Amino acid sequence: MSKEPAAGEGRRLGGWEREGGPERKNPSREYHRSSPGRPSSTICSHGDGLQDGKTQRRLGHASVAGVASVVSKQPWLTTFCVLCSVRAWLQATEGMNVKEECQRWFMEMKWKKVHRFVVYKIDERSRAVLVDKVGGPGEGYEELVAALPGDDCRYAVFDFDFVTVDNCQKSKIFFIAWSPTASRIRAKILYATSKQGLRRLLDGVHYEVQATDPSEMGFDVIRGRAQ
């Protein structure tokens, strides 16, 4: 003989429970129904009715939009997301290959004085630093500035000859990191994180100049740093 539940005790039968009154649905359980040739549907405890694949996709898009809304309202979350993106990009730029020609042209400029400047660029496809332009013996600082694009980043080295106040002939080598305002953010990050790999091979650089505008690397700036 089955024992009847005491007063106040609930009875669950097939997802329904009774507590001294009419039967009601137990909201803590989920039921799955499937039939041949028909995608399974889900009766969720948090929503009424069936959810098919399209409905679930719509809910997924709504969840992404909700997360984006939360991030936009929380400045610290935005900063965190940006830092994570930068960190991933820093890891991606590790191991950037610097071609042998980069150091060779620099050493010829330094010791043989056969040219006055060298411009370097990064080839994103081959992930390598290459020589973009070599200035001839008759080319000076104006030609170097003209060789730098207005919408992309570059590196450059310049051999600056000058006469001191004591009438002594001297030479100083400048490393220029060119990152114009109009360049892509991706390029700016790539050149900033890859700079040290090139600098380590250019032994003999005296000064470094970082410029986003031609006025920040004018000839008077170079002359003032050297003297």
Image (spheres, rainbow, N blue to C red):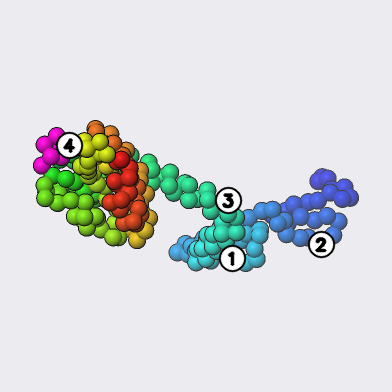
| Distance between the alpha carbons at the discs numbered 2 and 1 | 24 Å
Q: Which mark is residue 22?
A: 2
Q: Amino acid at mark 3?
A: Trp
| Distance between the alpha carbons at the discs numbered 3 and 1 | 38 Å
- Above or below, comparing residue 202 to residue 192 in the picture: above
Q: Amino acid at mark 1?
A: Leu
Q: Is residue 96 found inside the magenta-colored segment of the image?
A: no
Residue bearing the label numbered 4: 110
Q: Amino acid at mark 4?
A: Lys
Q: Nearer the viewer, residue 90 or 179?
A: 179
Sequence-earlier tag: 1 or 4: 1
Q: Which mark is residue 76?
A: 3
Q: Residue at x 78, y 51 (%)?
A: 11
| Distance between the alpha carbons at the discs numbered 1 and 4 | 76 Å
- Which element is circle 2 on? loop
Sequence-earlier tag: 3 or 1: 1
Q: Residue at x 25, y 58 (%)?
A: 149
Pointers 1 and 4 in contact (C-beta within 8 Å): no
Q: Nearer the viewer, residue 68 or 133?
A: 133
Dot in front, 4 or 3: 4
Residue bearing the label numbered 1: 50
- Which element is circle 1 on? strand
Q: As drawn, is 16 to the left or to the right of 80? A: right
Q: Position of residue 30 (x, y in %)?
A: 63, 55
Q: Nearer the viewer, residue 9 or 192?
A: 192
Sequence-earlier tag: 4 or 3: 3
- Above or below, comparing residue 199 to residue 56 in the picture: above
Q: Position of residue 22 (x, y in %)?
A: 81, 62
